[in-house]
Image (cartoon, grey):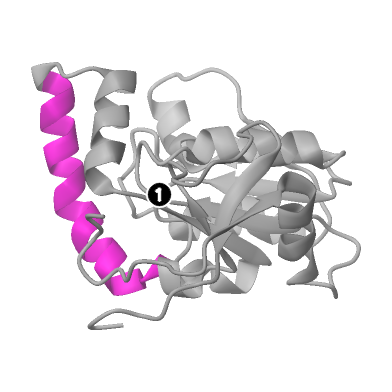
Amino acid sequence: MRLHPGEPEAVGWRVVDVPAAVRQLCEASPEVTGRPRVIAIDGRGGAGKTTLAERLRAAVPDSAVLHTDDIAWNHACFDWGAMLAEHILRPLHRGAAVDFRPPAWIAHDRPGSISIPAGLAVLWVEGTGIIRTELAPWLDASVWMQGDLDEQDRRLLARDGDSAEHLEHLARWMLEELPFLLREQPWARATMIVAGPAHLDHDPEAELVVAPPTSPGPGG
């Protein structure tokens, strides 16, 4: 399996049903009351983060999904942590609702806003770079999706195409992604590793392939 520099291959893979995975993630923060649990889902493009987030959302009544792409839109690849914390995670930790228009949405006339109601049980936050040091105080549990980079690249190109513009965007993205992930080591911080895509036989509608967190790699 080809992985990021510094990322150890997870071991101890096993198949669990989705409710069992949700219980493990929620039990990582048993003290949470009066606000949603904030559970992060991190991994590269093509790993299946959005699909996993929707599967977990469907398994938990009164939960919702936030995509970090909406925070990063026309803003930055990774330099959005402070904005996410201040305008979304901080009010959620107070038990308040969120209705936020990022500055880039205003500048580019993007309609709507990022709206999260009060009273949720869980907010699933999915996106590359969500598991990071500056956001650790705001996250109650997290998932890192580990998979072969070549397979994830194939899935990403199948999803988004291989136009010159897209390939140029991917090249720029990787210039920031590689050092960011090597520094942050999200695979070592995560509560749970999920295979993305999965490599053991399982029911993709009802089960996940999971492993314990891996140790930090060189430089971690």
The residue type indicated by label 1 comes to Thr
Nearer to us in this view, 83 or 214: 214
Task: Classify residue 24 by image quadrant.
Answer: bottom right
**Highlighted range, magenta:** 165-186
Residue at 36%, 50% in the rendered image: 147
Task: Classify residue 163 by image quadrant.
Answer: top left
Residue 47: percent from the left, percent from the top? 40, 41
Secondary structure under the numbered disc 1 in the rendered image: loop
Residue at 27%, 63% in the rendered image: 180
Q: Which quadrant is home to the N terminus?
A: bottom left
- Is any atom of residue 45 visible in this view? yes
- Is any atom of residue 99 visible in this view? no
Q: Classify 160 as above or below 42.
A: above
Q: Which quadrant is home to the C terminus?
A: bottom left
State the predominant SS element of the stretch in magenta: helix
Q: Which residue is mark 1?
A: 128
Q: Is residue 97 left or right of residue 168?
A: right
Number of marks in picture:
1
Residue 7: percent from the left, percent from the top? 30, 68
Please identify the residue farthest to the front as the structure is shown.
Answer: 201
Residue 107: percent from the left, percent from the top? 39, 28
Q: Is residue 164 left or right of residue 157?
A: left
Residue 77: percent from the left, percent from the top? 30, 46
Q: Classify 168 as above or below 126.
A: above
Q: Is residue 164 left or right of residue 9?
A: left
